[in-house]
Amino acid sequence: MEVKITTLSENTAGGGCLGEWGLSMFVEADGKKILFDTGGGFSSIYNANLMGVDLTTAECIVLSHGHYDHTGGLRNVLMRMRKKIDIYAHPDVWARKYGCMESGPERYVGIPFPREALEALGGDFKLSPEPVKLSENIITTGFVPMTNDYEIIEKYLTVKENGELKQDSLDDDQAMVIDTDFGLVVILGCSHHGIVNTLHHATKITGKDLIYAAIGGTHLVHASRERQEKTAAALIEMGVQYLGVSHCTGFRASAYLAQVFGDRFFQNNAGTQLMLPFKE
């Protein structure tokens, strides 16, 4: 099986593409075309046009979680598709999410559109906390258990319930797994529950141990050096062959992981087109 991944939206960009805070990838594998996240606004549409990606051919949309920088492009995408399309996500994707940094006021960071408006444009939300099979060899992770003691959710990420803010457990955080003959390819949104936890869960639900590539956000942007080191050590121990980071990884963590993984590391920014397996 070949896997083609086109990154449509990311903080940084190459090849004339637009950079925008967020993430979106167009994945072609196992006879399916899947849009994974939609970026923060208009960049996914613009870059798709530039890169020759026909979004109307997508057969479904997968949302990694309910933050605006992964869902803010939904309205533009649905207006471009002009058809009914399944959108797979965890039920908590519709939680009222806020970012509350110590230095500023609360800021809404959830899906920026009413559900009814997106459904009127053709979005058919399929919500489940469990893994969902999208094809014979493609599955969402569903809820990712947090099993280690160093991958944590930042306290500034909150939800509003009954008018009060509380820390967001981000149970909606999920990834997508492609089971190929050369190993697992794991597509990451933000990895709020931790990249290591996510990859462990991916091996558990597939029954496969070989991880060929992990690609996407790792949410190490605020991570201490100790967490960076523990994360890198765990990825090496798991035998991850290639690591392509995006979005919320941050410069310091990216630089450290590049040192650890060497030629097996790459920046996955907007404009990147990957064909897996890589040619040696």
Image (cartoon, rainbow, N blue to C red):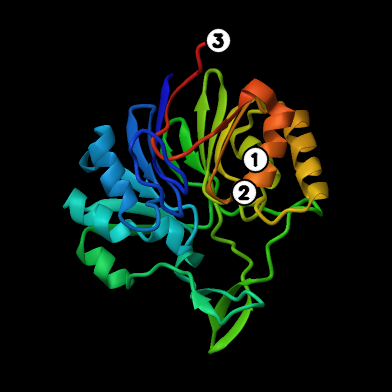
Q: CA distance from mark 1 to mark 3?
A: 23 Å
Work out whether mark 1 precedes mark 3 in sequence or the reverse, and give the earlier one: 1
Label 1 sits on residue:
254
Quadrant holding the C terminus: top right
Q: Report which quarter residue 111 is drawn in.
A: bottom left
Q: Mark 3 = which residue?
A: 280
- Distance (Cα) linking label 2 and label 1: 6 Å
Disc 2 packing (10 Å; few <14; some 14–19; many ≥20)? some
Could you tell me if residue 59 is visible in this image?
A: no
Choose between 257 and 196: the one closer to the eye. Answer: 257
Label 2, secondary structure: give it. Answer: loop
Q: Nearer the viewer, residue 252 or 193?
A: 252
Q: Where residue 63 appears, x then y in whole percent?
A: 43, 53
Amino acid type at circle 3 is Glu
On the image, numbered disc 2 is attached to which residue? 250
> Which mark is in front, 1 or 3?
1
Q: Is residue 99 above or below residue 77?
A: below
Label 3, residues with CA under 10 Å away: few <14, some 14-19, many ≥20: few
Do we see residue 147 in this rendering? yes
Please give the name of the residue rendered at 68% of the width and 53% of the height, measured from the top-left corner. Answer: 145
Which x, y percent locates residue 245? 57, 39
Residue 23 in the image: state x and y as whole percent. Answer: 45, 49
Q: Circle 3 — which element? A: loop
Q: Is residue 275 left or right of residue 259?
A: left
Do the numbered discs 1 and 3 sit on residues whose CB atoms are within 8 Å?
no
